[in-house]
Image: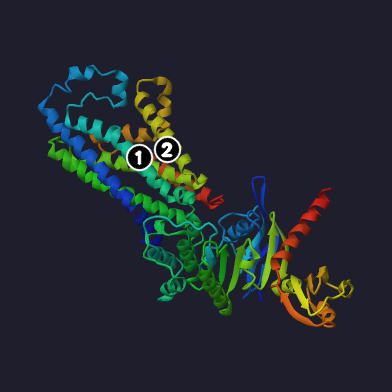
Amino acid sequence: MPTLVRKSLGEYRRALIGWTVGLCAFLGMYISIYASMMNDPETFSKQAIAKYPGAFKDLMGGMSDIATGRGYLQAVAYQLLGPLLFTMCAAILGNRAIAGPEEAKTLELTLTLPIDRRRLLLERWAALALGLLAVALVTLAVATGASSAAHMEVPFGGILAAHTGLFLLVLFFGTLTLCVGAAFGRKQVALAVVGVWGVAGYIVETMGRSIDAISWLRWLSPVHYYLDGRPLYQGWPYGDYLVLLGATAVLLMTALLAFERRDVGV
Amino acid sequence: MTAVVETEGLTKFYGARRGLEDLTLEIRPGEVFGYLGPNGAGKTTTIRLLLDVIRPTSGRATVLGAGTRDPRVRARIGYLPGELALEGRERARNYLQFLADVRGGVSRGRIDELAERLDADLSVRMGELSKGNKQKVGLIQAFMHEPELLILDEPTSGLDPLVQQEFLAMVREARTAGHTILMSSHVLAEVEHVADRVGIVRAGRLVAVEDIAALRERAVRHVELHFDAPVPRESFDGLPGVRDVVVQGTSLRCTIDGRPDALIKAAARYTVVHMVSAEPDLEEIFLTYYSEEEGRHAHAGA
């Protein structure tokens, strides 16, 4: 493994462990509630669900089949909270690549090493991607284990497809944070961009289903390419995932070009 | 011999603010070059340009025969940043090892040897290092790979006097080994004992480049002479290079520019019982440069 990737992973280690533990605890707890819910079918009966406002149900991805294993797993893990938490993790790590060290002024000495800037950025990104992949793999195992322990009867293929989408989504947002940080060198700017694009993208994707006026905006939402194909139900939405990957590649190229020509630490 | 550092019309503006303007400078192999100026004069800007941390607005610079954009050349440079930041839970020794690996390795025991000389504890986590110890770690990483060119930005800040002495010894050793050193400071006293030449930068412009020996020659000296009997003031009037003469009974105080020869010859006619000559104050001559330059600017502006 290249020195800088290893070094960056070492720097991310504590954060990675913390976020992995947190995400696993979240998934384990929420998924295990399913079993007790099944003992009390009243909670999520058709009549109970009908009482929720329509907009809320839209935001939560419909909730029409929340009493089934698949519907519940989608609603609690893959719809909102899972992506939200994992994206926060990706944004925090993405900021550790360039903007964080630059603000802390530790980047200056790294830049004066005999490494060109492109390689520095690529290796930092590789460490970010590997770190997120590690978190994704562990959480995939926990999601699979917990859902089978709760007798949700969701096939592994569906979980794997949904979890891959989740990984691609957070890789996109992590790369976005890194890219804005590489271009401007400010953590707050990067977090603001990710926050606005992420939240607006989520709202547009979920509410846009029933509001025509903003429906076309869904194409601009990264969340669209994660949610629209319903991978937990329908398996791999290859086209959507390729869009996420392609957008990530474009962001990475932008980061390389922006970082290459910028004054650092000014 | 080709210059180790060569700049031509090197200019850097931060937006409308001038960082450095039209710097043309040559640093020769094997010399210690003191780069002097008050804070904010453009010293750090110059250094960051040489290391490609920032990019020039115009002009060009070569370091060790290559353009500053060539990353390979940086393996042969040791750099101590002016604002050295070391953070995190990593231990200083591991960080140094990482830097050494990226630069292509250092000879065995070199890090420990330097740590011992500077009395630095490398088992401490970097975020917990004191300011002085951070500076020591910074010096170790700059010197450890025995680079051909050392670029040190305010190297002695935060060091106690004993460590400063050790640092100066390290600089001299590097020069003996044929390496070149560029060190910046805002006070001349910090570099005058090791530097061969000094460049003086002010408000983004290089004002003067001087040989330290020549500077010393021209330095201002305060001299006090005591005689066995009162001396007439007239004997000391109009001596070349002697000014501010004050005679009080048997003692005489004056300031000499450059050589003390005329004063000594004049005083030799009387019986001198005691003589005090302060160390040449290079700081003073250094400051004259500033005020002259300032005068010229004021004049040009009027």
Q: Amino acid at mark 1?
A: Thr
Q: In the image, B261: left or right of B21?
A: right
Element type at mark 2: helix
Residue A139 vs residue A68, the one in the foreground: A139
Residue B169 vs residue B68, the one in the foreground: B169
Q: In the image, B7: left or right of A226?
A: right
Marks 2/1: CA–CA distance: 9 Å
Residue B221, image x and y in percent?
Answer: 74, 71
Residue A158, image x and y in percent?
Answer: 22, 38
Give yes or no for contact between labels 2 and 1 (Cβ–Cβ under 8 Å): yes
Q: Is residue B85 above or below residue A34?
A: below
Write down the quadrant of residue A216 in the picture.
top left
Q: Which mark is residue A87?
A: 1
Q: Earlier in the sequence, mark 2 or mark 1?
A: 1
Residue B249 vs residue A140, the one in the foreground: B249
Element type at mark 1: helix
Picture residue at 82% right of the left edge, 78% below the top:
B229
Residue B258, image x and y in percent?
Answer: 78, 73
Q: Amino acid at mark 2?
A: Val
Residue highlighted by disc 2: A194
Q: Chain of mark 1?
A: A
Q: Chain of mark 2?
A: A
Q: In the image, B186: left or right of A239?
A: right
Q: Is residue A57 above or below residue A263?
A: above
Say if residue B176 shows up in the picture.
yes
Picture residue at 42% right of the left edge, 41% below the top:
A247
Of the 4 image quadrants, the one containing the N terminus of chain B is bottom right
